Structures are given as C-alpha cells and as structure tokens.
Amino acid sequence: MLKRILLLFTILFLTFLLPAEARVYIDINAPTFVQIPIVLPKWKPVDNTPPTLSAKAYEILKNDLSLSGFFRVIDYSRLPTQLQSKEGIPSTLFLQEWMPAGGEILLAGETFLESNGLRLRLKFHLIDLVEQKHLVGKEYEGPLQSLRTMVHRIADEVILQITGERGVHNTKIAYAAFQGENKEIFIADFDGADIKQITQNRSINLSPTWTPDNKKIAFTSYLKRNPDVYLIDVDGKNLQRFAYYAGLNASPSWSPDGKQIALMLGMEGKSDIYLIDVKGNNPKKLTKSHGNEASPTWSPDGQRIAFVSDRSGSPQIYVMSKDGSDVRRLSYEGSYNTNPSWSPKGDQIAFCGRVGGRFEIFSIGTDGTGLQRLTSNSGNNESPCWSPDGRYIAFSSNRMGWSKIFIMNANGFNQRPLTQSKGGESSPSWSKRFE
Amino acid sequence: MIKKSLSIIILIMCLGLILTGCPKKTVIKEEPSVKKAEELAPERERPAKLEAERAAKETKEVELARIKEEESRKALEKEVESRKVLEKEVEARKVLEKEVKARKVLEKEVEARKVLEKEVKAKKEAAAAAEKEVVAAKEKVAKLEAEQALKEKEEKAKEEAVRKEFEKSLVVKRYPGIEGEVLESKLIKDIHFNFDKYDIRPGDTEILKENAALLTKHPSVKIQIEGHCDERGTIEYNLALGERRANSTKQYLISLGISSDRISTISYGEERPSDPGHNEEAWAKNRRAHSIILSK
C-alpha cells in the first residue's frame, strides 16, 4: 500500500538546482553545533484548497524541522508584523524584505488540492537569506492521505540540502508498551504520530526489532509459555513462531546482509549468543564463557558482534568476530553496562550503563576510546538504538514517572519524548527509511 | 564327711595292725634255743641213771622241746598267721590304697563333675538368661512392630493429611496471553536473590529442602521454576539473569534428588513483579525464583 502511494509521488524538479559550490551549513560530525535559524512563512492554500490543510502541512513540517535538532524554527507568528501575513513562495526579487526575519534560511511552500478533493500537490522552495539565493525547490504529488509522508519527504530534502545527508523523517520506531498489564508491540512514526498497535494477544511481548526489509517485526512473546521469537508483518498480520528452542529465545539481530540472525538462546540452561539462519534453524553457539550473554548487535560491515557478558562478574560490553573468536572487552567504566547498539556508521557503540544507582546512555568508540555520557540526572535511561543515519538515538527513560521512548541527537542534545501517550514504553527499535 | 571319717578309721586300723605285728621280732629271737636242744641230743647215751635222769630229763626236755616246739610252732603258726594277717593287711592296705586311689579318682571325678555341673549350671543359667533376653527382645520387637505399625498408620494419616493439605493449597492460575492453565501452591515457597546475582543464598537452602521434600512426597508433580528480576537493569539482560536464577534453583533441587524431568524453567526477566513498588523493599521481593505446578 505504502509503496503504491510512494510510486504515485511525482517529484518535479524545478529550475532552481543546488549550486555546485554548496555551502556547508552544519557539520554533523562535530560534537556540538549551532542550530540554524530557519524562517517558516505561512503556507499558502492555492485556489480552493482549504486553509486547514495548508495549516496542517505547515505544522507537520515545523515539527519535523525542530525534531531534527538542526534548526531553530522561526514560526510565522514570531515574525515582524509586516511579514506575518505573507503566504507562499516569495519572489527572488523581494528576498530583501525577509532580512528582518532573523533567519539564515527560509522555507516556503504552497498546498494545492485538486478539484476532485483526492489528490494533493505540495510545493516548497528553500532560500538562503544570507546569500540571497534559491537552494532547492520541489513539488510532490500524492493522495490526500499521504500528506504526512509528503511533508516528511520535504523535511528530509531540506536536511539533505543543509547537512549533505537525507533526514530520517520517513522512518518508524517500534517499541513495546503496556496495554493494561500486558505488553504489546507498537509502531510510531519518527515524529511520534500514527501510532499503531500491531500485536493484540494480551501476552508479554518484548524487545521488537525490524527485519532488514522493513516489512516485519521480530519480538519475544510468551504466547506458548516460553519466551520465543516471533515474526509479524508491520500491519499486524501473519504472526509466525520463528525461534522456539528450549529456554530463552530473545533479542534477535539481523546481520547487514540479512542472512544470519544473532540472538540469545538459553537451551543450555543459561543465555548464550547464537547464530541461526533466516528460517530460524541451525543454531551455532558463539559464546563460550560461563557467564550470561545477552543483547547481540552486528557491526554494519557484518564482521563483528557486540554483546553483553557478565563473565567478569558484572555485565560489560564485549566485541567478538562473527565466528565467536577474538573476544575483547569494550567497557571498563562502571559495574553494569548493557544494551549495546552498534552505530550505522560503524564507529561507535551506544549502551546503557549504571552510574550512582541510575541508568544512563553512553556511547563509546569501537576501539574503546571516546566514552561519552549522553544522558544525565533524569531518571533511568535504557535500551539505546540508532537511527538509520546514525544522527539520533532512541532510548527509553522514566524521567517523566512512566517509562517512555525518547529521541535525542547522537551527541545527547535535543532529548524529547517520541509520543504524547501516557507511557509504559520500552525497547525502541528504529526502522530503515521507507523510500 | 562320712567318707573322710571312714578313711580315718581305716588308717587307724592299719596303724593298729602294724603295731600288733611287732611280737614277730621276739619269736625270731627264740629260734637259737631250739637249735641248742637239738645239739644236746647226743649226750643222752650216758649211764642209766643218768640214763633215767637223762631219760626223765630227756622226756622233760622232749616235753620241753615239744612244748618249745609247740610253742615255736605255735609261734610260727602265729607268725604265719600274723604274716598272713600282715599279708592280708598289706593286701587290705593295697586294696585300701587302691580304694583310696579309686576314691581319689572318684573324688577327682566328683570334683570334675562338680566343676562340670557348675559349668553346666552356669551354662544353663546363661542359656536361661539368653532365653530371657530373647524373650525380652521378642517383646521389644513386637512392641516396636506395634509402634511401627502405629507410626505407619500415623504416617499414612499424615501423608493423607499432607496430600489433602497440598490438594487444598492448589490454586488455579491463568496467565493472560500465555497458553495453558497452571496451579500454584503456597506450600512451594519462593527463594530470593541479591541484585544482579543468581547464586542460591545460604539462608534459602532450607526453603529449597522443604520444597524438595514436598516434591518427594508428591512424585507425580511437575513444576516450572520462574526466574524473576527487579525492574532495574535492562530487559534483555534481566531475561538472561532470570534464566540463570531459574536454572540455579533447578540444579539445587536436582542435587536434592528431584528428577530433572520434573522441573522445567522459564525466565520472566522483570516482566512479572510480585510487588509493583519502585523501592528497595519491592525490588528485594521481586528478585525471586517462583514455582508453579504444570501437572499434579
């Protein structure tokens, strides 16, 4: 369905293309950066398009841009009076009048609902106010119900122009959340909208993970009175019991090529890291210590696996090659380090560590250097997981009383809850981009 | 006593006989005079007168000699008799001696017999004592058997009571969204763990021994040990920790003689706290191994 919608998109490149000597607005590799002030004039409803539709597109875009963490959004209501009522895309001839807005960049757009009321066109222009020039302008067309996706694509495009890499607004986050006394699996968009409950079995459903094709969610469930790994389509259909060896079956992690799955199996009376094939067969034990082994995560090059082991007496982060050899310890600070997540760029591992009785999110270089604490003094923070572009980390935090999914920039800035729901959420897993 | 006095009398008699034997010596001394008379005989061939005298003398002498002879014969006879008596005495003595010997032998025998008798008596006594003991033992055994029978009865009653108590303690438990209906009994007790630990605490071994005793009493019962953690720490690591807690509990029960095929394990990690609180007291309660009954 989604694919069909996406196919319907018509992307019209306007005459203004990105100049060859593109200015670097944000160095995303820097540990800290200053947010770019971006001016957002009111969107214009063209012809008979209802103004509410325009306003909706505007709100989604504004939220996307502020969630991205790259921008300080200057809302039209905060503009000088003479600019507040200006709608739509300004002419390049009158860019000078936008100087008092106080922004470096201006993003303007128009919505056009076709007369049959079913198809929607969105057009945007991105303008550099400092250099007084157009950066990019595009038009998207799709069914009315794809409004959100279309706006997310605009936001991603803007981020591509500014940072050199596309944004992740068209990604989803799966997580487990209490539904009464039971935990069910949910999916939400990056901006926390469009929450869908995909399991309704009233069992205990834990730690969801996206399959590499973005089509299924793997999770652990107690349906058969054993923690087994199940697969389910993102629309909640085709539940399939996937790994159900004796004892614990949990925490699957697909290799980047999608051919192998690392997971926790307890068939020998304690949890170890195993590899199984895509059908859930041929388990091969990788860990050989007497400790408890947990939470495997693949390196993006598919050569190594990071995991948790308490072989030293307390849980710590270790890295091994994919055949179980060459094991080395990565974390030495603190006595409780778990939940490793290998960054998509391959250079960092995020994990959860205990500091002074509280759990915080850390990141560390894969060579064991550059330990960084990303959360502090705000409840317990657990289960970090990277966005597909490596610029964000989702995690769970009970800083608001209830455990909720939070998202922050990879450097720890811009922490915000994913959804506005009451809470009881845990174990986020970030999808790849839906193209 | 009689025998002793008899022997004394005999001895006295013997002594008497010996003493009466003494005249023999005097008889022996008179012998030379007899010989003299014989030597004088040739002188009788002198004148008549002399002859007559001699004859008278001779008759006298003959008479004397005869008397003497008679006397000597008598003495001899006496001697012979005395000798015979002596011999008899000797024989008697010998007989006596023999008798004495025999008596002594007899006495010895008697003594031996006495000893034997004593021994026999002792043995008999011992046998009697032994018999008594046997009887006593038998009585004891009977008593014990009775006691045991009583005990067994009591035990059976107890077992029945235990079974009934166990049956009574069973509560049906349904976990929403989890297949199957299981039972719970407050008689199978939980054990608890320290933070991030899965070893059995020394104080909890008694609880496991009680649980094992209960399982021994109900050999058809199959249990599932649930490993639980407190809410701190991460979900997946707690799944591993719960797995280990359930299994260390299972291993302990196996070491107490419970068959491994009667015990399955499951880790619930931090998903099923028994106390919903968010404090140390609640956490301590929640770090536990809890058992449910899969089949009774």
Image (spheres, coloured by chain):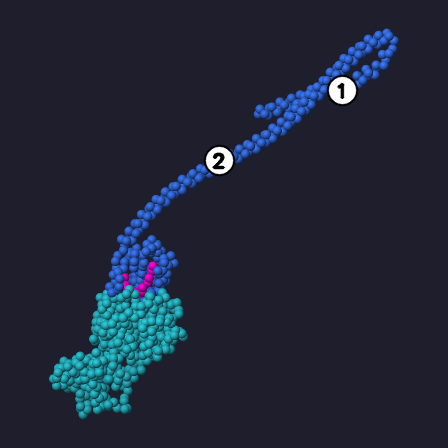
Q: Is residue A178 visible?
A: no
Helix, strand, or loop for circle 1?
helix
B269 in magenta: yes
**Few, some or many C-alpha atoms within 10 Å of disc 2 (few <14, some 14-19, many ≥20)?**
few
Point out residue B142 in the picture as x, y percentages from the top left corner: 39, 41
Point out residue A133 in the picture as x, y percentages from the top left corner: 22, 90
Helix, strand, or loop for circle 2?
helix
A400 or B4, which lies in front? B4
A22 or B19, which lies in front? B19
Residue bearing mark 1: B28
Which amino acid type corresponds to the residue marked 1 in the rendered image? Answer: Ile
Instruction: Classify the position of the C terminus of chain B by image quarter.
Output: bottom left
- Return the disc, 2 or 1, that comes first in the chain's sequence: 1
Point out residue B243 in the picture as x, y percentages from the top left corner: 33, 65
Q: Height in image: B273 above or below B119?
A: below
Q: Give me the residue at 22% from left, 69% from top.
A: A200
* Chain letter corresponding to the colour cyan: A
Asked where in the image residue A138 lies, by quadrant, the reply is bottom left
Residue bearing mark 2: B125
Which amino acid type corresponds to the residue marked 2 in the rendered image? Answer: Glu
From the viewer's perspective, tell me whether residue B119 is left or right of residue A262: right
Q: Say which mark, if any, is on residue B164.
A: none
**Few, some or many C-alpha atoms within 10 Å of disc 1 (few <14, some 14-19, many ≥20)?**
few
Hey, which residue is sitting farthest left in the picture?
Answer: A48
From the viewer's perspective, tell me whether residue B276 is left or right of residue A94: right
Instruction: Provide the chain ID for the residue under circle 1.
Output: B
Q: Tell me whether the residue at label 2 lies in contact with that at label 1, contact meaning CB atoms closer than 8 angstroms.
A: no
B67 in magenta: no
Q: How many marks?
A: 2
The colour one sees for chain B in the rendered image is blue
Q: Which residues are magenta?
A: B262-275
A16 or A406, which lies in front? A16
